[in-house]
Image: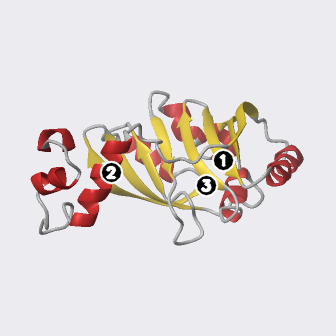
Amino acid sequence: MVIFEFAVPAETLALEQALAEFPDVVVELEQLVPTNNSPLPYLWTNEGQIPAFRAAVADDPHVDRIRKVATFEEGVLYGIEWADDADGLFDWIETQHEETAALRARGHDDEWILQLRFPDRERLSEFRTFYEAQDIDLRPIRLYDLTNHMTGQYDITAKQREALLTALEMGHFAIPREATLEDVAATVHTHPTLAE
């Protein structure tokens, strides 16, 4: 597995005008297991309640439809239906999502920073052929092989992981709750306050 992180100008991906009009807004596309053709159907922003930003996103030629899903103190989650991008970068990401995962896409000011995971260097080479043929102004940031298993990526100890898994198995997170925190703590031989 190979991880490639790079920057591209906003016009290469999407939301060029919205990002230019609102340079303080940070946009993150949320990646999830795709249930349709789009691996990036959600968009987080830190913009709060700026109707003009939503209108600028809706006017983007890469967007077919935008709808507000939820509002939080820190920002807004939108659902996005992307327009067909012909032979552009976004379309490449959509058509390759079964082999290549979009791990991160963050737009700010006039550029996007993307992080893609390729199954091997051959697929990365195919991506390079694509972006060079499309004359995409791509600035590499980082390229590395994924050599370690991702367990532990949340910075928890082995004991904390054991407690979380035990709590899950015992039904602590079920509704209604099937096990108390004290039950979990007794099973993993720790004090209940340490299991929190």
Residue visible at 46% across and 35% down? Answer: 26
Residue visible at 49% across and 48% down? Answer: 151
List the residue tagged with mark 3: 62
Q: Residue furthest bottom?
A: 36
- Above-or-below relation of 52 to 95: above
The answer to which of marks 1 and 2 sits earlier in the sequence is 1
Q: Which mark is residue 162?
A: 2
Name the residue type under label 2.
Glu
* In front: label 1 or label 3: 1
Task: Pinpoint residue 154: horizontal percent, then vertical percent.
Answer: 42, 41
The answer to whether residue 145 is left or right of residue 37 is right
- Above-or-below relation of 54 to 173: above
Q: Quadrant of the C terminus?
A: top left
The answer to which of marks 1 and 3 sits earlier in the sequence is 3
- Cα gap from disc 2 to disc 3, whole angstroms: 45 Å
Task: Pinpoint residue 170: horizontal percent, then vertical percent.
Answer: 22, 65
Name the residue type under label 1.
Leu
37, 115: nearer the viewer: 115
Name the residue type under label 3.
His
Residue visible at 13% across and 52% down? Answer: 181
